[in-house]
Amino acid sequence: MNRLVVRWRADRDIDEQLVYLAKQDQHIATRFLDSVERTCQLLAESPDRGFRWDQDNAIDRGIHVWSVQGFPKVLVFYRPIEQGVEIIRVLHGARDIAALLEKEF
């Protein structure tokens, strides 16, 4: 079984983006949530799929990044763990990602 651990901030990131999208189009919001769930499950099954995030000390912490299927500007930041992944944040690529990830450690 593949283990999927979602940190509370990643869960909050998803909720915030879901609310934003739902204000524009409920269908897109539903598609987004389905895509996030599928992407996270895919990463749990294949943790090496993503790329190492090479900002600041993220490499030392083993952080990887992969985009949400169908939403290429939304990035999943995760760390491979035993038998799966830990989802750290789910952020839009236009945000100050380095600063937001720094707060995680």
Image (tube, grey):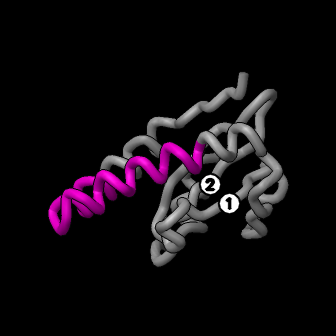
- Horizontal and vertical percent for residue 90? 50, 55
> What's the residue at 73%, 56% (across, down)?
64
Q: Identify the residue under disc 1.
A: 65
User: Residue 53: x and y, percent?
Assistant: 74, 64
In this rendering, position of residue 80 left or right of residue 95: right
Image height check: is 64 above or below 42? below
User: Is 61 in front, or is 46?
Assistant: 46
Taking the magenta stretch, the answer to whether it contains residue 37 is yes
The quarter of the rendered structure image containing the N terminus is top right
- The circle on residue 8 is none
Query: In the rendered image, is residue 57 in sight?
Result: no
Q: Is 25 included in the stretch rendered in magenta?
A: yes
Range of residues picked out in magenta: 17-40
Q: Can residue 6 be seen in this view?
A: yes
* Residue farthest to the top, as pictured: 1
Which numbered disc covers residue 77? 2
Tag 2 and tag 1, C-beta contact below 8 Å: yes
Q: What element carries label 2?
A: strand
Judged by its main secondary structure, the magenta piece is helix
